Image (tube, grey):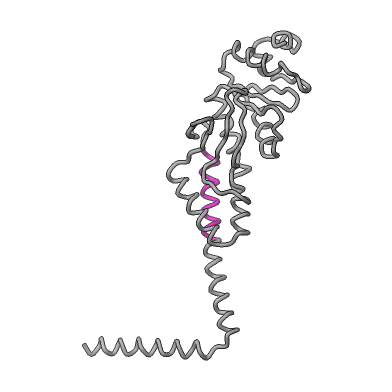
Amino acid sequence: MKKLKKYSEILESVKRYNVIFEKSLSPDKIDKINRLKDSGDLKMILNDINELVLDLKERLLNIDFDDIEYSYEDDIISLSYSDEIHALLVSLKYKTRKSSEEIEDKIFGNGWKDLFLEIEIDTDMFNRIDIMNGLPKFIKGIGLGKKIYKKLIKDFNYISSFDGYEPSIDSSMVWESIARDEDLFTFSNGDNLISFWNNYSYNDIINVLKLFYKNGKGEQQYDDSFLKLYNLDEDHLRSLIS
């Protein structure tokens, strides 16, 4: 009992000392201490953010395109993440919001609000895709966009960028990568692009290309791998789709 009383007295003395100590400091000094504390807290948050970014990049960099999951309803494709990746994204979003708008913008991009990428696909217009909300900044440049496109091409047999949509730099870079992929056949009609999964039947590809090239809007370019596989030259293919 005596020990307990002694401890409580010491605790009370410490509290009184802290009050006296705080009162003895000028407002400027107190403000400086608070700023140092805030700076230390921010540093810890930034370290956490950096670790989360590196972890997420590594996970998404190593994901196979065929393992990408999404939901599809009313012509809207919504990208899905594993429970682990989703939890990490939620944590990263929370921590960046807690730090500053500048850091949040640097990591996610201005206006990036949702955790799920959404793509509109027009199945009546050559499966034309329109990105409704892009990937966050920190994920760009690791090949995830190309993997998403490739997954859609495999599942829908083909996709296109068609009819007057102004392509973004990110989209153009993805399409350039798609055009080099050996699993895909990519054709262009001026600024319009269409890419097929290479297991899609020859006759079906020809029938789609007939419609795709029906209203020519520029130079026509044909996939070299497709021509080689089916022993065609450009003139022959042109005659088939005219």
Quadrant location of the C terminus? Answer: top right
Residue with the most extreme right position:
219
Residue 220 percent across, percent down from the top left: 75, 20
Q: Main secondary structure of the magenta part?
A: helix
Q: Is residue 33 left or right of residue 210?
A: left
Residue 218 percent across, percent down from the top left: 78, 23
Residue 224 percent across, percent down from the top left: 70, 19
Q: Determine the residue positioned at 69% across, 20% down.
A: 223
**Residues rendered magenta in the picture:** 47-63
Q: Is residue 124 left or right of residue 84?
A: right
Q: Determine the residue positioned at 52% across, 64% down.
A: 44
Q: Quadrant of residue 105?
A: bottom right
Q: Quadrant of residue 149?
A: top right
Q: Determine the residue positioned at 49% across, 31% down.
A: 72
Residue 184 percent across, percent down from the top left: 61, 23
Q: Is residue 153 left or right of residue 193?
A: left
Quadrant location of the N terminus? Answer: bottom left
Residue 117 is inside the magenta segment:
no
Residue 151 vs residue 26, the one in the foreground: 26
